[in-house]
Amino acid sequence: MSGLQVNVLRHPRVANVIMWVVSKCIGRPSFRSLGIVLFEALFARQAIAALRGVDVIHHIGQAHELIGFAAAAAARKLGVPFVIQPTVHPGQWGDSPFDFYLYQQAQGLFAITNFERNFLESCGLSGPFFIVGNGIDNRTDGNANRFRQSYSLEGPIVLFLGRKTPDKGYTLLKQAFSLVQAQRPDAKLVCMGPTPGEQPSQVCLEVKDGVLELGFGSEQDKHDALAACTMLCVPSEGEAFGLVYMEAGRYAKPVIGRRLPVLEELLGRQGAGLLVGRAYGEGNQVGLDVIELKDAILQLLNDPQLAEQLGKNADQVSEAFIWSRVVTRFETAYRNAVANKTVSLECLSQTN
């Protein structure tokens, strides 16, 4: 966090026993209130000291981290608005009754998309809501030649960026790409990202069976890969926003993702991405099989005009989410939250 003041909240070692009790309480709905009280007793005073003098307190996340409750307590004590940015993945995380108990304590809810706001409203939250989006660096300085030369890559590149886990679509993509190669042996799949600690490392710095497995790369490595790729393919099972698709958009690269409601809102309706799969159940689930994903990759490989148009549209869409524009939306939301809090306090004083 270069250039930013960071205050770390800590509990004394002697309080480890209390934290153990808190962990047991949080796992049992009937004891959660006790867990929250104990957690606030340990951390609320520190939070108040660290946050004294601020105009608004902004919590990013859900309830199970518990720090949101200490932040809410600090906001009440300091008399400042408390806002939450839940980053909900409906049906996956952030939508439990415990989470909504925390969200109800906020004077404002920052939603990343209209889909998230509509979902929160449908669950009974009244807001006020502020649609802020998410921010990306306005970068197009990736060096395609450097990336290709570093790994002796020729031909079209399908790029995967993210954790190498099934929920990010990594396993499905590798299966689909093995079928792609039967028709397009010139294509390469580059996977860049960390492997979960409990799994064998998926890193091989040479192309093997058309696949290059890279580990966690630097920001420059990532941008070099984006500049070099023919398309980005990250068929995640869930997304709150999908920053990586927007980052690819800055390079006018076509993207493939699941037809998730969030991506449909941000990319699909603008013709800025090739979205695949079929919704099932309620909420945010989209089924996708190997054949459909294979066909989507081949469609972009075999139709350069379509790929180019999708990339141009993605470039236009991503323009709205560069940091300078997103910061303006956050500033407006903060000012509204402070103004709403001031009005509420004035109304309260008039009734007393």
Image (cartoon, helix red, strand yellow):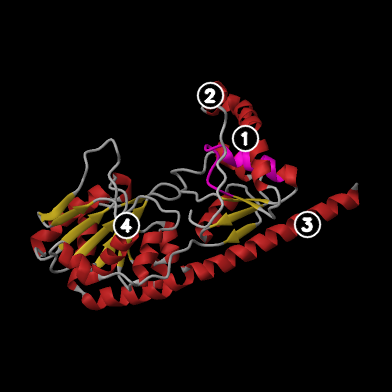
The reply, left or right, for residue 327 in relation to residue 319 is right
Q: Residue at x 21, y 65 (%)?
A: 147
Image depth: mark 4 or mark 3 in front: 4
Query: What residue is shown with label 3?
Result: 342
Q: Say whether disc 3 or disc 2 marks the residue closer to the N-terminus.
A: 2
55 lies above or below 308: above
Q: Position of residue 310 (x, y in %)?
A: 32, 73
Q: Say whether disc 1 or disc 3 marks the residue closer to the N-terminus.
A: 1
Kindly report the distance in space between the C-alpha atoms of the residues bearing marks 1 and 3. Answer: 26 Å
Q: Say whether disc 2 or disc 1 marks the residue closer to the N-terminus.
A: 2
Kindly report the distance in space between the C-alpha atoms of the residues bearing marks 4 and 3. Answer: 44 Å
Q: Kindly check if marks 3 and 2 are in contact, taking CB atoms under 8 A apart as contact.
A: no
Q: Residue at x 47, y 63 (%)?
A: 135
Helix, strand or loop at label 1? It is helix
Q: Say whether disc 4 or disc 3 marks the residue closer to the N-terminus.
A: 4
Image depth: mark 1 or mark 3 in front: 1
Magenta stretch bounds: 59-75
Query: What residue is shown with label 1?
Result: 43
Query: What residue is shown with label 2?
Result: 16
Q: Say whether disc 1 or disc 4 marks the residue closer to the N-terminus.
A: 1
Kindly report the distance in space between the C-alpha atoms of the residues bearing marks 2 and 1. Answer: 13 Å
Q: Say whether disc 4 or disc 2 marks the residue closer to the N-terminus.
A: 2
Helix, strand or loop at label 4? It is loop
Query: What residue is shown with label 4?
Result: 218
